[in-house]
Image (spheres, coloured by chain):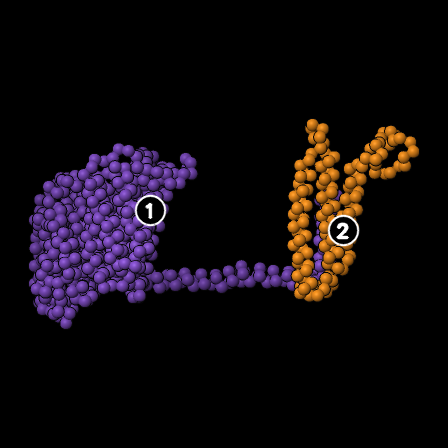
Chain colours: A purple, B orange
């Protein structure tokens, strides 16, 4: 029992290491190792899920500096991590299998599968961590493995830039996260989640300190879960292979931020002002990302912005719900339908010979009926169509948000309408209308190995939110005092979004609506470019001046010239006669002895 | 000092370094004088002679002078139990062994030097200078 979590954790790492050794000799073996590790993890996770929580301690001390600092490595097995384990390993297993078909003809096959296995290992580490340091280590490992996978096509400049951007933007958030960890450690002297939660009483006299620490911890989420204003890396990370995007968006990366908030939920609850900050960031992200999604042309970017928007919901849910189960419920359903949507997008992209612009597709409904069906299910779940999984989880978050933060709650309601609009826009442009390009005319349905994961994911995308399934995984409750009109309005907005998008885009050959503000992503990316160009360049100017005049002249040139001058004088002592040297030496010894003994 | 001098048997000539009244037993001072002489000879040879072989011998003399004084100190330093401390004499064996090895290396270098330059005069070996 106590070894099972460790086996789940380390099998993918062993697989990744194995692929590094055997990968270059055998493609099937490398894929098999990765898929096998995910399968082992999946089976064991479901088994673990069925077990009661273990009572024995699963913790070791990795580094022990006495009372001051003990760095533990340990696993937590509780309802939260068990659900997350199930989600992560199941999604990974499906995506790994799907990759068999998607990556069939791509280069860097074994490198890709090694990266996937490492990615899975890192995410499992975050899920199982029982202390801040271990979570931070794996947090960074997730950043590293996403860097490797987003930059899979590193020969393309855009991919190289995207992976670099993802890494650097994440570092900004991680810096805050690390500071937050240090804040909490400095106050409580422990790094364990339980330990910090147990000593929350110490903060009673100093709520501002706790608020600052929580906001700093939340910075980690802002980076990893792509909240405003650090969301820019996520759409650009679409440069990676599509299964990676699917994994990234569903289970292994962006979910980490929300999971971390859920893990430290009791700490956040003690800092209501930090929760306000979290709520505002989440609410604004949720709405703004949906606005941006309505005007994108790249099939994967639309989905990326929808992910940001859904993550905004989850973060808002963390801030407004009384238990972490509410946002985790949405994370759970979102994982299945977003994974499904991305795998469908991958299937479309393969069918279109790696064309991603939706305005070059069209009328794929008949060419790829199965993908179409799966994508409709995913889209319906995402937009909150009644009886689909997203409907239950999203409406729950919105209901809680409306009760606690009315303004943000209604913003989230509006976002729900936008979600339906941009999803139907995507579906209509890609699958309806008429073919706009040669590839769209000759598109073919994807191979079976890619369709099977779609089928598997369609089921939970449909039913994962149904109350009897929700009861197995979570204990959520409905808020009291919800305005009676909320659910009718949500339904109305859904219908309005679907209908308007359908009418607008059913036969459109180019986008009939043009809003440059949204198409250019609210100019946030441009703002960053401007900031980097001006602020960083002027900083670089100062640094270059310092380097040239202070470092080069004062630190390098002056001592070097001085040493040279001393050497020039002293070298006349080198007269080449060994006996003279012996004499100098002897005289020196005598002189020293004289100084030591008689002075 | 005067006590011991007075206790000297008559007929034995005075020698300024003697501190024992047993005439034929050398004292610590005798050893140190010999050691000092050896060292001086070695130093003088090292500084003044021109042949590198002789200089090398001078070096060895100085080393042995130091070793000799070590042995002498060891012999005349009585411990709590009234016996001399022989630790240093054991150490001297090691010194001799290492010195033998060092001589082998040094002579080999000199041989190699002679083969390269056909000279063992240090005045001719002054290329390494400013």
Residue that numbered label 1 is attached to:
A136
Q: In the rendered image, is residue A134 in sight? A: yes
Q: Where residue A23 sits in the image (x, y, percent)? A: 30, 57
| Residue A285 visible in rendering | no
Please tell me whether mark 2 sits on a helix, a strand or a loop: helix
Judge from the rendering whether residue B22 lies leftward or rightward of residue A336; answer left or right: right
Question: Which numbered disc, 1 or 2, marks the residue closer to the eye?
Answer: 2
Q: Quadrant of the C terminus of chain A?
A: top right
The spot of residue A284 in percent (x, y) is: 22, 52
**Residue at point 18% right, 62% down?**
A299
Compared to residue B93, the image places residue A498 above or below, namely below
For residue A527, the mark is: none
Determine the residue positioned at 29% across, 42% down: A6
Q: For residue A317, which quarter of the picture? A: top left
Q: Nearer the viewer, residue A41 or A438?
A: A41
> Which of the pair B93/A570 is nearer the observer?
B93
A5 or A280: nearer the viewer: A5
Quadrant (top left, top right, bottom left, bottom right) of the N terminus of chain A: top left
Residue A215 in the image: x percent, y percent?
Answer: 30, 46
Instruction: Tell me: residue A449, above or below residue A131.
Output: below
Q: Which residue is mark 2?
A: B42
């Amino acid at each position: 029992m106590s070894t099972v979590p460790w086996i789940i954790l380390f099998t993918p790492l062993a697989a990744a290491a194995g692929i590094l050794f055997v990968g270059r000799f055998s493609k099937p073996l490398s894929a098999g190792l990765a898929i096998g590790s995910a399968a082992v993890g999946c089976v064991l996770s479901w088994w673990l899920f069925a077990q009661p929580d273990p009572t024995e301690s699963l913790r070791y001390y990795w580094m022990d500096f006495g009372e001051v600092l003990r760095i533990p490595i340990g696993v937590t097995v509780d309802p939260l991590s068990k659900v997350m384990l199930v989600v992560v390993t199941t999604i990974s297993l499906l995506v790994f299998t799907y990759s068999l078909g998607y990556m069939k003809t791509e280069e860097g096959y074994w490198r890709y599968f090694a990266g996937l296995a490492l990615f899975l290992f890192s995410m499992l580490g975050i899920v199982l961590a029982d202390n801040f340091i271990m979570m931070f280590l794996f947090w960074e490992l997730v950043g590293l493995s996403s860097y490797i996978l987003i930059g899979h096509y590193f020969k393309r400049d855009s991919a190289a830039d995207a992976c670099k951007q993802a890494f650097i933007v994440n570092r900004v958030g991680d810096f805050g996260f690390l500071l937050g960890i240090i804040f909490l450690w400095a106050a409580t002297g422990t790094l364990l989640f339980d330990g910090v939660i147990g000593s929350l009483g110490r903060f009673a006299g100093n709520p501002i300190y706790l608020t600052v620490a929580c906001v700093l911890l939340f910075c980690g989420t802002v980076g990893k879960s792509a909240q405003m204003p650090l969301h820019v890396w996520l759409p650009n990370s679409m440069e990676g292979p599509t299964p990676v995007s699917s994994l990234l968006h569903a289970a292994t990366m962006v979910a980490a931020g929300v999971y971390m908030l859920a893990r430290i939920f009791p700490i956040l609850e003690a800092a209501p002002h930090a929760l306000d900050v979290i709520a505002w960031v989440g609410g604004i992200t949720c709405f703004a990302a949906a606005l941006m999604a309505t005007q994108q042309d790249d099939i994967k970017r639309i989905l990326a912005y929808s992910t940001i928007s859904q993550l905004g919901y989850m973060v808002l849910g963390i801030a407004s719900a009384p238990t972490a189960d509410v946002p985790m419920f949405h994370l759970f359903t979102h994982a299945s339908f977003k994974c499904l949507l991305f795998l469908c997008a991958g299937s479309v992209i393969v069918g279109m010979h790696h064309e991603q612009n939706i305005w070059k597709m069209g009328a794929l409904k008949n060419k790829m009926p199965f993908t179409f069906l799966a994508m409709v299910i995913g889209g319906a779940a995402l937009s909150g169509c009644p009886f689909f999984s997203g409907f239950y989880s999203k409406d729950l978050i919105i209901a809680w948000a409306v009760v606690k933060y009315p303004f943000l709650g209604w913003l989230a309601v509006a976002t729900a309408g936008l979600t339906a609009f941009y999803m139907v826009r995507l579906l209509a442009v890609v699958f309806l209308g008429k073919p706009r390009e040669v590839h769209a005319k000759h598109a073919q349905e994807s191979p079976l190995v890619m369709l099977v994961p779609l089928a598997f994911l369609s089921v939970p995308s449909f039913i994962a939110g149904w109350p009897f399934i929700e009861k197995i995984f979570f204990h959520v409750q409905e808020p009291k005092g919800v305005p009676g009109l909320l659910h009718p309005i949500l339904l109305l907005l859904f219908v309005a979004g679907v209908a308007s998008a359908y009418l607008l885009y059913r036969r459109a050959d180019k986008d009939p609506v043009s809003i440059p503000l949204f198409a250019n992503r609210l100019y946030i990316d441009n703002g960053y470019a401007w900031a980097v160009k001006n602020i960083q360049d002027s900083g670089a100017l100062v640094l270059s001046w310092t380097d040239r005049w202070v470092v080069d002249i004062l630190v390098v040139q002056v001592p070097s010239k001085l040493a040279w001058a001393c050497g020039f004088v002293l070298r006349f002592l080198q007269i080449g006669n060994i006996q003279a040297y012996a004499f100098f030496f002897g005289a020196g010894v005598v002189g020293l002895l004289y100084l030591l003994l008689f002075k | 000092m005067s006590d011991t001098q007075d206790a000297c048997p008559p007929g034995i000539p005075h020698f300024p370094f003697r501190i024992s009244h047993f005439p034929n037993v050398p004292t610590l001072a005798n050893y140190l004088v010999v050691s000092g002489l050896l060292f001086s000879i070695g130093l003088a040879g090292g500084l003044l002679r021109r042949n590198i072989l002789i200089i090398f011998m001078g070096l060895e003399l100085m080393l042995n002078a130091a070793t000799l004084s070590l042995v002498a100190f060891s012999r005349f330093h009585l411990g709590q139990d009234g016996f001399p401390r022989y630790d240093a004499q054991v150490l001297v064996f090691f010194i001799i062994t290492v010195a033998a090895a060092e001589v082998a290396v040094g002579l080999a270098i000199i041989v190699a030097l002679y083969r390269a330059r056909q000279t063992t005069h240090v005045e001719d070996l002054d290329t390494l200078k400013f």
